[in-house]
Amino acid sequence: MTTAEIYAEFAAREAHGRSPAYERLAFAVARDSEMLALLGALPPAKRQPNLLFAVVRLLGGPVEDPAAFRDYTMGNWPAVEAEMRTRATQTNEAGRCAVLLPVLAALPQPLALLEVGASAGLCLYPDRYAYRYGDRLVGSGEPVLKCEATGVAPPARLPDVVWRAGLDLNPLDVTDPADLAWLDALVWPEHEGRRARLRAAAAVAAAEPPLLVRGDLADDLPGLAAKAPAGATLVVFHTSVLYQVPALRREAFAEVVRGLPGHWIANETPDVLPYAGLPEPPGAALHSVLALDGTPLAWTLSHGQAMTWFA
Ligand SMILES: C[S@@+](CC[C@H](N)C(=O)[O-])C[C@H]1O[C@@H](n2cnc3c(N)ncnc32)[C@H](O)[C@@H]1O
């Protein structure tokens, strides 16, 4: 895809209905030959709309009005470009715990959680958050993660987590204001609820920071998994990570994880982690597939706000 197509597709498929501001910006960039030329000089992985818009927000630039956004971005291009070259999209969405919870709660307890592509590790605290599935409340903490669950009974109790560790190429530290500012900038402008959730989940993680290790999800996984305590069920999991990993490395990771003891939970879009015989997704929005040990179980929405289990 050309950069113009990437921005147009982002506007139509990802931002439409979810962020009017980013939809406007992305359509405007898609038609702007000068901005496209600047973006075209970046490596392909650095041209993404999410990265550009988050960097401009981080620097304090405007993202509501396409003309003001253009003026700011073109006028400050050296600073914008420098941030885009060094940063990556690392959105950390605690809400995804809501789709993991039914699987985690059904495994033999207690659990040793190992998340690959953990970002700041906010998905490593599924036992600390509360959940609202329809009118059922599970747990009593903060934030309360809302999820529309179809075809599955909400778990009766929270999992018992005795160990939590994360692996990431660039782990973020929620106790560092600069890392927290980047996580905040990655949340889309209109998503105030998600911003509040980020703050609440970051407070949970900051109170008991997880073991976060800098490393690659395939090469460094066995070493970290070996540190999990005996007597707990090892659960390696990942959500919205594999789209950032080249295809051959995804296969290498799957081979490594299949060779480990314990269980493997994946929550990824089927273009990067395919399964045979999936049913049609329940709508046009981009869905991920929740899977346990390679068996697909449910369609999920990207921030954990809904899941539809397969019949
Ligand atoms: C979009 S974030 C998702 C974070 C978290 N899993 C969540 O759902 O909130 C993807 C994360 O994967 C990490 N990542 C990408 N490639 C990786 C690799 N090869 N090894 C380890 N981490 C990787 C990125 O640094 C980033 O923090």
Image (spheres, rainbow, N blue to C red):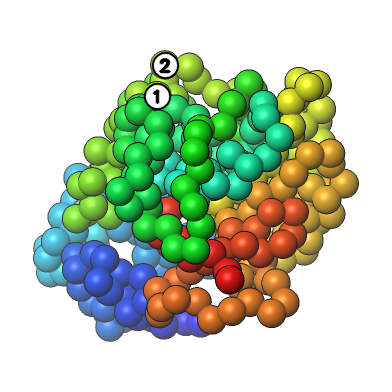
Query: Which quadrant is the C terminus positioned in?
Result: bottom right
Front-lying residue, 2 or 154: 154
Tell me where residue 65 appears, x and y as whole percent.
12, 65
Tell me where residue 305 appears, x and y as whole percent.
37, 56
Tell me where residue 117 appears, x and y as whole percent.
59, 44
Front-lying residue, 87 or 164: 164
Say which residue label 1 marks: 204
Say what amino acid the circle numbered 1 marks: Val
- Does the CB distance between marks 2 and 1 fall below 8 Å? yes
Residue drawn where x is 78% and y is 22% of the image: 231
Res. 58 visible in picture: no
Secondary element under disc 2, as helix, strand or loop, is helix
Say which residue label 2 marks: 207
Residue drawn where x is 40% and y is 74% of the image: 285
Query: As drawn, is 210 to the left or to the right of 203?
Result: right
Vertical position of residue 12 compared to residue 100: above or below:
below
Query: As drawn, is 60 to the left or to the right of 301?
Result: left
Say what amino acid the circle numbered 2 marks: Ala
Residue 150: name its quadrant. bottom left
Front-lying residue, 134 or 42: 134
